[in-house]
Amino acid sequence: MRNSPPEPPSKTPSAGAEQLLRRLEWTVLRRLDGLLQGDYRTLLRGTGMDLADLREYQHHDDVRHIDWNVTARLQQPHVRVFTEDREMSAWFLLDLSPSVDFGSTEQRKRHVSAEFVAVLARVLTRHGNRVGAMLYGSGVDAVIPARGGRQHVLQLLHTLQNRPQAQDTGGKGTTRLHELLESAANLVRRRSTLFVVSDFISEPGWEKPLGLLAQRHEVVAVRLLDPLELELPDLGLIPIRDAETGEQLLVDTHDAGFRRRFARIAAQREAELRQALARAGVDTLELSTDGALVDALMRFTDLRKRRSRLSGGTPSGSKPPAHLQQAA
């Protein structure tokens, strides 16, 4: 990648990283193992594909997998069905801009992001796969190459835990998520699974780069959110500060009309964001600061299982039915 940011200096993983990973291994990974019963194919997909079978074409199949020789011989469109290899590389594209440091309780979106990375990275590396990361603050400022092993996961967590809290831009600008996505397109050449972990509070222009990534890679949008971003409770007169721009306002949440307007605007943004992600052709996993990580992962897994049954095993990269392109 041209002008790629330097890799963070190697450091010995901290006790905090070890403590976090051990806690998640006991609380989340053990339960996830039991629920998935060792079958990670519906949650995580490989990159290599072996021809397994042929079947008649269905309306949701990718036309790129039509076997034209068989189609001509049988006078009926047929597609190739593949079995995917387990080995894969995964990249975490991490939005660590100021808005990700928000949380209405002690649990911030940044903490949810770190726990998600820890769980998925450990799931992958336990099965012989490699994980890497790109970190975005006010720009793409760190790249952690894809490697395997528990020690590498600890190093990744150490980097996230010891990263200084993002500073607001003082009104000089907002998150430009498209920069992270375009950098990933230049860096990650081999087909991989990409987890875009962000609250998607960003300047416009990220939708097209995300769609282009999804044409080459298996892309999952991991959306971070907090309940207070969707609906304001009656807290009286409170100051509200935009973490991205630094702008501050004093608002009266006791005003029921104001709360309704806030909820209406938030609902409109929700609908527009989900539509944009669906148009990009990516799956969406939503992680809330007040939700359980393992429950969100299992809802997401159930979505992919349903899709797999409907598509008859169509490989990743083909477009799913429109009603299944929504958030888990």
Image: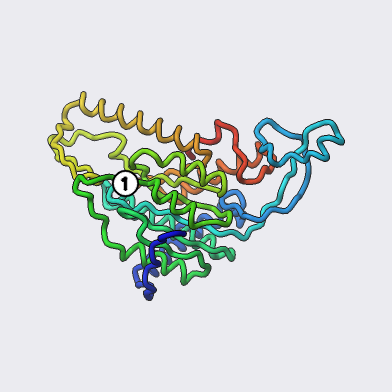
Q: Residue at x 32, y 43 (%)?
A: 226
**Could you say which is closer to the camera, residue 305 or residue 129?**
129
Instruction: From the top left corner, tell me how far across and down residue 302 is, in percent.
Output: 56, 43
Q: Quadrant of residue 129?
A: bottom right
Q: Amino acid at mark 1?
A: Thr
**Could you say which is closer to the camera, residue 16 or residue 156?**
156
Instruction: From the top left corner, tell me how far across and down residue 195 is, in percent.
Output: 47, 51
Q: Residue at x 50, y 56 (%)?
A: 31
**Could you say which is closer to the camera, residue 299 or residue 100?**
100
Q: Residue at x 33, y 50 (%)?
A: 109
User: How many marks on residues?
Assistant: 1
Q: Is residue 121 left or right of residue 307?
A: left
**Could you say which is closer to the camera, residue 8 or residue 189?**
189
Instruction: From the top left corner, tell me how far across and down residue 22 is, in percent.
Output: 43, 66
Q: Is residue 81 left or right of residue 316?
A: right
* Rendered position, 103 above or below 160: above
Q: Residue at x 30, y 29 (%)?
A: 265
Q: Residue furthest top?
A: 257
Q: Residue furthest bottom?
A: 12
Identify the element where label 1 is drawn.
loop
* Rendered position, 135 above or below 104: below
